[in-house]
Amino acid sequence: MYAPKPMRPLWPPLIKRDKPPKPGQTEDERRQARIPLTHHEILALAEPFTRRGRHVDLAGSDRLARRIRFKPTAYPGTRGDPGGLTETLVLENPGRQHFRLTRTLTDAAGRVATLRSDGPDPKALIERVDAVDPRRQFPRLGGVRVACSYRIEVDPGTDGGSNEAVRLVFLRALTDVDGIGIELDAQVGHGMPAEIRLVSTPQRAIRPSEDLLAVLGWAWRSLRPFDRGWRAHLRIPATEPARTPDVEAKLARTLEHLVTTLGASPADFHRTWLRQRWFALARRTLGLMTIAGLLAIGPGILLFGAPEGSPLRLLSFVMPSLLILVLIARHEAPSLKVTPLPRPLPADAWTPIPRDAHDDISDDLHASA
């Protein structure tokens, strides 16, 4: 059956509406046609890796996704650190001139750390990754081994080659302290705080005080429950090169504090940090008091009879806007509930508990969250 063609507009639209890009993709990635890798392309891309002792795992590679996986490489333990590491390399080609190399390291305890590098030349990517010692990603902080993941960032002001300036950008860290999983997630937006998570396990669950980490200083916020345990925000610098050293230093201090605190009785925590607990209480109520003050100033100015046209009267009408600016600048919502006064913790606040009790605590966390 004949169907007429749609009529074309008589004139072009005033505003050209481009198709919105997909999130998380560059322009080069969107233009890349999903052409499967050929055998010759795999050999050419893997050549700098083969010269460094890495061999392609054809069974684990995905030609259609343009992903090449290399066979695992074992790093034996040393005298100071007897645990060995297993390395797995994955080279991806999401764009015509864009390659991504990811190194995944796994230790004997199953902790996983990654190192990622992006660029147009696979040879330069493997050189940058090999320049980072695998042991660098598994430091011992506070007496525990931590799996730290990074991204290699190249200074755009350098010309590449041997003169290029690279630095490691901290992404996340994983470890455990006496059966409690510790996670630090720094993969956040510009100026946003990182997040520390205390993850309960079937072997051990805790009922910590909300100021368990806030006693360390202004950068550490109060703990709040979520479905897997407890989490708190951590203030960090917005940009490099100050960001990564600051995160690493705060991670080390956090782990030292948790190892010492969880290794002692809850009563010791209250006695040792009593003064800091009161300071943490004052900091936690500061946001709520600021909002309450801004809301009270506006009506107060009108109540006390500010004259027409005065700056004070104008200020009373812009108070809601100032309140919004304060909330945006904080990058976090203030707590609106009444904060309890610092009190001694129960004796079983972080002692190992059976599985049934762990299920009860998980139910309590869901209810309180």
Image (cartoon, grey):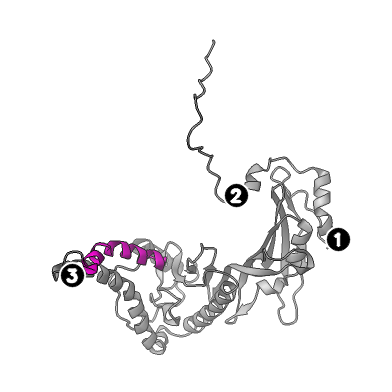
Q: Quadrant of the N terminus?
A: top right
Element on which disc 3 rests = helix
| Left or right: 283 in relation to 70 | left
What residue would you read off at disc 2? 25
Membership of 275 in magenta stretch = no
| Residue at 50% over, 70% down | 203
What is the three-letter code of the residue carrying label 2? Gln
Q: Amino acid at mark 3?
A: Gly
What is the quadrant of residue 290 in the picture? bottom left
- Residue 45 visible in the snapshot: yes
- In the rendered structure, which amino acid carries the disc numbered 1? Arg
Viewer-closest of 47 and 356: 47
Q: Name the mark nearer the viewer: 3 or 2.
A: 3
Marks 3/1: CA distance? 75 Å
Find disc 1 in the rendering and name its residue.
51
The relative height of residue 82 versus residue 316 in the rendered view (above or below) is: below
Marked residue nearer the N-terminal end (2 or 1): 2
